[in-house]
Image: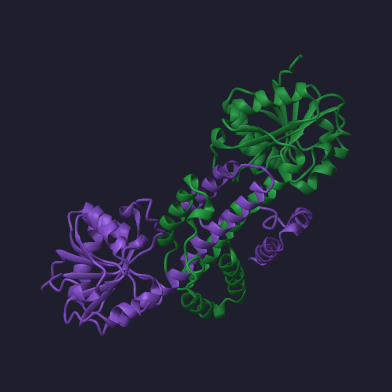
Chain colours: A purple, B green
Amino acid sequence: MHIPELRNIVIIGAGNVATNLALALKDKGEKIIQVYSRTEKSAKTLADIISSSYTDDLKKINMNSDLYIISVPDSAIIPVLKHLSLKNKFIVHTCGSMDMDILKHASSNYGVFYPLQTFSRNRKADFTETPVCIEANNIAYQEALMNLAKLLSDKVYIINSGKRKILHLAAVFACNFPNYMYRIAEKITENNDIPFDILRPLIKETTGKIMTNSPSGVQTGPASRKDTDTIEKHIDMLSEYPDFKQIYELITRNILNDK
Amino acid sequence: MHIPELRNIVIIGAGNVATNLALALKDKGEKIIQVYSRTEKSAKTLADIISSSYTDDLKKINMNSDLYIISVPDSAIIPVLKHLSLKNKFIVHTCGSMDMDILKHASSNYGVFYPLQTFSRNRKADFTETPVCIEANNIAYQEALMNLAKLLSDKVYIINSGKRKILHLAAVFACNFPNYMYRIAEKITENNDIPFDILRPLIKETTGKIMTNSPSGVQTGPASRKDTDTIEKHIDMLSEYPDFKQIYELITRNILNDK
């Protein structure tokens, strides 16, 4: 089997994921020949960092690349694809919630490169520790993508579209919702002139426990120990925050009923 | 002002907080002369680790101690106090949600030593990094407690009972509820034969961001970017988990409406 080499890369998108991925690729010596973004400014910003060319015109996408990575917001993928006809060039998207097959009209060789991480443009993620979920529509390109993924990360998984979507859903519970819980804690403390910083060691230790334990084994708090007196006091204290009160009541009820 | 020295300590309780606190005190050379627990076995287990005597009889509490630390479940504090008459011996509790004044019938000198952390008996917490919130009903003992707290932790705060209760409520959002979100993620992945471990780097990075950022500034995910297509897909996928679906919908609605 001939495994294609993915030497020249075009990145379509310049957001959080595209930026972190481009930086990681460049760090490993990969050649990014072009960045596309809908806005010239975003394209130029990323292109300048990684020393590539850039465009804001999909008609000017370089056609001599080995790999096209689409990393735009989910809702922009289909509109972008309408303007791309890559024949047999290898194209992947980086999205958790979209089928691989949405790419099939753009090329005969396609796949997914989904880094399971929360990225910010202003914070360089440790890609080595980032799980990367890959799939491709044929074995040769799956191997090629595997080689590329392994260059970047120690944790590469072959995951089909169905399981990837489940992971993406689980990630909302593992990342986005905990962060919103932190926001609530921040609002409650700051409204009472208490610095949020006092809660950071608690947040750190809560996550520290999870790194080596199952969350089921380390649940603590009033609901976990069926301490209804404290729960009632908390609900009283939340009377001025009806939204937070509703969240408190719902999650508490779930913890109380949890086996 | 004469600041009392707190040399000999009796610990009433042998649970997660009592155990971690006793270990930290012993590490710093404090003398724990007795451990009380309702069950002899628990009392002995902790007493053996820290080389102290123990009892399961409140009538046999050693009356020659400088400090009595009550660290029992919230609901057990009042029943325990009924059996304690310490005159002017200094007594504190370690509870986030209880007024300091509940101790006033047990002694004329009382206070609170509240470590803001999630403790497990089988995991030794880093007490140096644990914020400790103290208060006392007089300045001399407040200073004495401050000295003791500073021996254990780099982060000591004088916090009154009202603010401490708010912190305790905020801690539920900062610790217990995120852990329950992890449990949901664990159930969803494991029900689909995906190892929960694949989510750990994401959890670590989510918390890593919070250590140097405000949670308001680093919210990500479908709700944060108003991606209603993905939200609808997720809600569909949760049809077999009605409880998780309800939680997903409520938190998503709050993030969508968040300013």
Seen in the picture, residue B229 relative to B256 is either above or below; the reply is below
Q: Quadrant of the C terminus of chain A?
A: bottom right
- Residue closer to the observer: A194 or B178: A194
- Residue closer to the observer: B30 or B160: B160
- Residue closer to the observer: B162 or A57: A57
- Residue closer to the observer: A129 or B188: A129
**Residue B65 at least partly seen:** no
Give the image location of residue B66, x and y in percent: 75, 22
Q: Quadrant of residue A47?
A: bottom left
Left or right of A184, for residue A92: left
Seen in the picture, residue A164 relative to B105 is either above or below; the reply is below
Give the image location of residue A78, x and y in percent: 34, 80
The extreme bottom residue here reads A105
Residue placed at 15% from the left, 70% from the top? A65
Q: Quadrant of residue A46?
A: bottom left
Give the image location of residue A205, x and y in percent: 53, 46
The extreme left residue here reads A2
Give the image location of residue A15, x and y in percent: 35, 62
The extreme top residue here reads B2
**Residue A13 at least partly seen:** yes
Residue placed at 57% from the left, 57% from the top? B178
Q: Quadrant of the N terminus of chain A?
A: bottom left
